[in-house]
Image (cartoon, rainbow, N blue to C red):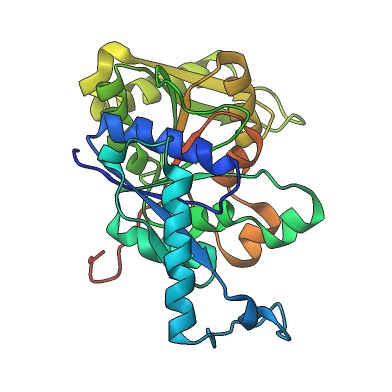
Amino acid sequence: MKNYHILVPLDFSDAGTFALQAAQKMAQLFDGTITPFHSYVPVSDMQDTDPFEISFPSTSVADIEEIEKIHRQNLKEFCSGVVSDRILEEPVVEVGNPAAAIAETAKKFDLIVMSSHGRTGFSRFFLGSVSDKVLRTAHTPVLIVKKEKQLQTIDNILLTTDFSEHAKNAFPLAKEIARKANAKITLLNVLSFDIKREKPDQTTIDKRKKRLDDLAHAELSAVQHQLETRVIVSSDSPHEAILNEDLNNNYSLIIMSSVGHTGIEYLMMGSTTSNVVRHVESPVLSINPKKKSSNREE
């Protein structure tokens, strides 16, 4: 995996600097380039409009061209001094809903790197954030970084699995990052149990550990000298168990597959990945591959 093309969505907030720094770290690993990105909705299109309606730009073509020219210049200035000019590509500016525009544009890229503002509370629950929506809809790997813990070095990676085929989609990229960064990688499985019932006995735990070791041998043998496996027995939810694991071990990067829930199920429950991104401080790399259609084409 070389010459990675990395898309970095920016809204010109300070948090964007952390995304650019993380993107540069990934670009160094994969001999890649960085493309800054910004999406906007013209102010004229938001006036006298129901906030739940989807509208199309009414701003003139000349105005849009001038606005985009300004945004491209602002993107260049924002990246100046943060990202090496050698790996910086021409900025991309699009008109439209940010999350949808990011997901669409990212189809031509290998990785999305973006910051999360960590909004919480009522509005966060019902509206979500741009990073949430990108995690849910984009089929390009998404790296989310926060102010609390930025991606400065990659030496201790947490890779999660629930033994599903979907979870394996995160393994190739995790393996390549661990190999290139010479990082320790921990393959983790959470053995959850209902606190109202009896805790799993040692035989059950040993069988789960054996299954995890077999999986590691089959899928991650290329980094076996950097690899360890761990089963956590917990009455907490999987994302809470992962949060506690991260707090206790200070991982530099968490890598996991995203289930990609949508609609009411996502709104009410969320996914383990989105909950991990919401609560942990460590950077999270999420892989949400495009599902295969009935004719087996991507």
Depth check: 177 or 66 in front?
Answer: 66
Depth check: 146 or 291 in front?
Answer: 146
Write the residue at 30% across / 63% down.
292
Is residue 208 among the parts visible in the rendering?
yes
Depth check: 268 or 29 in front?
Answer: 29
Relative to 271, 162 lies left or right: left
Relative to 234, is 1 above or below? Answer: below
Relative to 167, is 217 above or below? Answer: above
Write the residue at 53% across / 85% down.
59
Relative to 257, is 57 above or below? Answer: below
Give the residue furthest to the right: 122
Image quadrant in which the N terminus is located: top left
Write the residue at 58% across / 35% down.
146
Q: Quadrant of residue 297?
A: bottom left
Write the residue at 62% across / 82% down.
45
Image quadrant in which the C terminus is located: bottom left
Residue 221 percent coordinates (x, y): 23, 22
Relative to 175, 259 lies left or right: right
